[in-house]
Amino acid sequence: MKKILFVSSEVHPLIKTGGLADVAGSLPLSLAQLGQDIRIFMPNYGAIKYNREVHKKCTLHIDNRTIHILETKLPDSDVIVWLLDYPDFFGNKGNPYVDEHGHSWINSAERFALFSRIAVEIAQDRAHLDWQADVVHCNDWQSGLVPALLSIEPTRPATVFTIHNMAYQGIFSQETFQQLNLPGELWNHHAIEFYGMMSFIKGGIACADHITTVSPTYALEIQTPEFGYGLDGLLHHRHNELNGILNGIDLEQWSPEHDTRIPQTYSAGRLAKKLINKTALQKHFALPENESIPVIALISRLVDQKGINLVIECLESLIDYPMQFVLLGSGDKELEHQLKNLSYLYPDQISIKLGYDEDLAHLIEAGADLFLMPSLFEPCGLNQLFSQRYGTLPIVRNTGGLADTVVDTLAETIADQTATGFVFNEPSVGALLETVKRALLIYANSKVWKQLQKNAMKKDFSWQKSAKEYIALYKTL
Ligand code: ADP
């Protein structure tokens, strides 16, 4: 049994902006179920919605600041969550990272440097919590300073740093570094210095005992200039201490057999019932209610990474085909605007909901026939996993976790019943269009389609498998 401090800047269902929260809400649970003593550490954001008791555990003083650590538990579990309570930094009720215009909070460096420093105090059992970690498992740039700070302690727990997305690095000026009151020895290119700037993520990559990312293919991709953002050399240098472990999904929440948020539960053996959700989805999106017309869906943050531009261009050409398209997302204002425009032009075929809505995400997974993920890069991706569980066949680009989790529909994969979706290589409108058309053609053959749905629904994306891989890793450290 290991004592693991799991450090994450977001944890579902307390607060979520993306896949990291899903992982941080599920992996610790599976680790606990497998007998590990795990504590989650995260900031106490003003926007958190608690449904369990929260109480003050202890008080620390750092740089003339008085900081409380609160304790609660993950809903429906005994997993302890410790929260950094410092309202001056985290009390805001908005998004954890950005203001209402989508700009990073001006004091991001201070906020997450403090978060990292307190994580170190907890890990070293200097926070009056009476608990000494064996392993500190950090995630993404917000906790990247933790392995760096621990690396200069005389004795310390082992450190793991997981990269959920290389695109977010936490890069700040040298001047900011000086204001943060961090140990000066970290300012060197073997630690957090990155071309004259300070890089939080580099602290994790350079100093952790082991680095993981969330799929085997992404672990290879980030060692290349195209995906490495200038850190590919360092990642390649550390390739012996770097591997990919696929994310699982929370099957309590994401299973069509007992999903309480959808109008009609169903299973691989009762696929006809899925149609009730399809009709409800069409109704919700004010599209003609028609069981036989294929519904293509997309749920995403609207950012370049997700290939939304390709989708927008592709839709114009798809309008001539019998199909409906529904999208739930928010993000880039220009993309939002273009998508909305398309829905005004083609109200019978394209319907767009801007915003963040978890209940609607479940209805979409349950009601749609196809799910689009033409990402330019995708560390793991969760929606293609949810989609397969719901028999909603994903159309994905051959990258990162998408490549590792979706099996393309070809003559041989139809024959051996392994096909679960549609995969294309080039990040081009032509390639995407071609693949959507290929999927629509197969949709017309209901016997083959049903078999593909069954193949997808029976795949095992549970957390158990991945959690065991993490435990095996912790043991080697
Ligand atoms: P990323 O972490 O890059 O955003 P992932 O596919 O790993 O991508 O995870 C995204 C998660 O956020 C999924 O659980 C997805 O359903 C959810 N999500 C994204 N946008 C929305 C939205 N507008 N409404 C509801 N859920 C969303």
Image: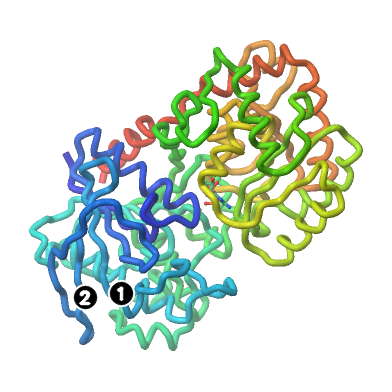
Look at mark 1 in the image and give the residue it sits on: 114
- Which residue is outermost to the right? 320
Query: Residue 452: where, in percent of width, then height?
Result: 65, 19
User: Which label's residue is closer to the chain start, 1 or 2?
Assistant: 2
Amino acid residing under circle 2: Ile
Which disc number belongs to residue 307?
Answer: none
Residue 319, by quadrant, is top right
The quarter of the displayed image where residue 438 is located: top right
SS at badge 2 = strand
Q: CA distance from mark 1 to mark 2?
A: 10 Å
* Image coordinates for residue 237, horizontal then vertical, percent: 47, 55
Q: Amino acid at mark 1?
A: Leu
Q: Residue at x 21, y 55 (%)?
A: 53
- Residue density around tag 2, few if under 14, some if 14–19, many if 20 or more, within 10 Å: some
Q: Secondary structure at mark 1?
A: helix
Q: Is residue 194 visible?
A: yes
Crowd tier of the residue under label 1, counting other residues whose Cα lies within 10 Å: few below 14, some 14–19, many 20 or above: many
- Which residue is tagged 2? 67
**Mark nearer the viewer, 1 or 2:** 2
